[in-house]
Amino acid sequence: MTEIPPLTPRDAFELLMAGNQRFVSGTPEHPNQDAARRAETAPSQQPFAVLFGCSDSRLAAEIIFDRGLGDLFVVRTAGHVAGTEVLGSIEFGAAVLSAPLIVVLGHDSCGAVGAACSALEDGQTPGGFVRDVVERVTPSVLAARAAGRESAEEILAEHIEQTVDLLLERSRILADRVAEGRLGVVGLSYRLGDGSAQLVATRGLDTAAPSAA
């Protein structure tokens, strides 16, 4: 199997963002998407990033970052809300598979964020388990408003930052790897209109320590 050499968190971030730039400019290379790559990755995987994003159908990770099979370990939920199963999945990608980067990916016009804002304004929350998603987003909306951040873009950025912090607060495994220089965590805000991913938050990104198991 053709493996990517050990990457620092910064290396992994730059590799990911280079793919997004190709996507935005309309010059994707579609790497690692052929039959040969399929055969190479069948025995094992070595993703260079864990991508935790919203489940929105317009946020297909391998497409918007121009990557292929075996490159990204993807975890997605509506509104990128994180329960124990999500935390365990992210820990698996970072600690077991040794990915040096975690990306929290939010986007504009997010239905979960919009629903949380509406629930606070009119007191109406969705039924079923959608209610749980909205309730998990609500603290981010409240934090944004408490800080005077009222626009949709500012509230989204707050929710992305809150999610980045939540991962490190709830997972000692992830926090330790960041402290050791083996892991970086970034928050990105994706723009549906132009396809660009904008940096919102970073933790442990600027480190020279290589990824290690």
Image (cartoon, rainbow, N blue to C red):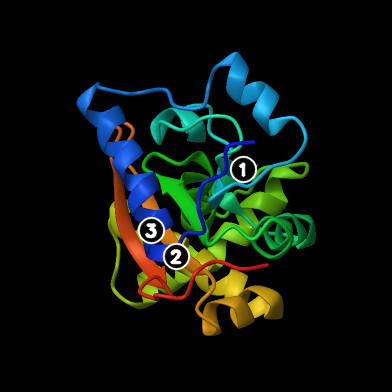
Q: Residue furthest front?
A: 1
Indicate the amino acid at tag 3: Asp
141 relative position to 137: left or right = left
Mark 1 or mark 2, which is nearer to you?
Answer: 2
Residue 109 seen from this side: yes
Residue at point 53%, 53% (across, down): 116
Q: What residue would you read off at disc 2? A: 8
Q: CA distance from mark 1 to mark 2?
A: 19 Å
Q: Label 2 is placed on what type of residue?
A: Thr
Residue 29 placement, left or right of 63? left
Spatial separation of the CA atoms under disc 3 and disc 2:
5 Å
Q: Quadrant of the C terminus?
A: bottom right
Q: Looking at the image, which is closer to me, 47 or 151?
A: 47
Q: Where's residue 196, x and y in %?
A: 28, 39
Quadrant showing the N terminus: top right
Q: Which mark is residue 48?
A: none
Q: Residue at x 60, y 49 (%)?
A: 124
Tell me the SS state at disc 1: strand
Which residue position holds label 1? 74
Residue 33: image location, x then y, percent: 53, 21
Tag 1: Cα neighbours inside 10 Å, few (<14), some, or many (≥20)?
some
Q: How far apart are the alpha carbons under marks 1 and 3? A: 19 Å
Query: Which label is found at residue 11?
Result: 3
Are the residues tagged 3 and 2 within 8 Å (C-beta)?
A: yes
Numbered disc 2: secondary structure: loop
Q: Is residue 158 above or below residue 104?
A: below
What secondary structure is found at the residue carrying circle 3?
A: helix
- Residue 144 image offset from top left, x and y in percent: 38, 69
- The mark that comes first in sequence, 1 or 3, is 3
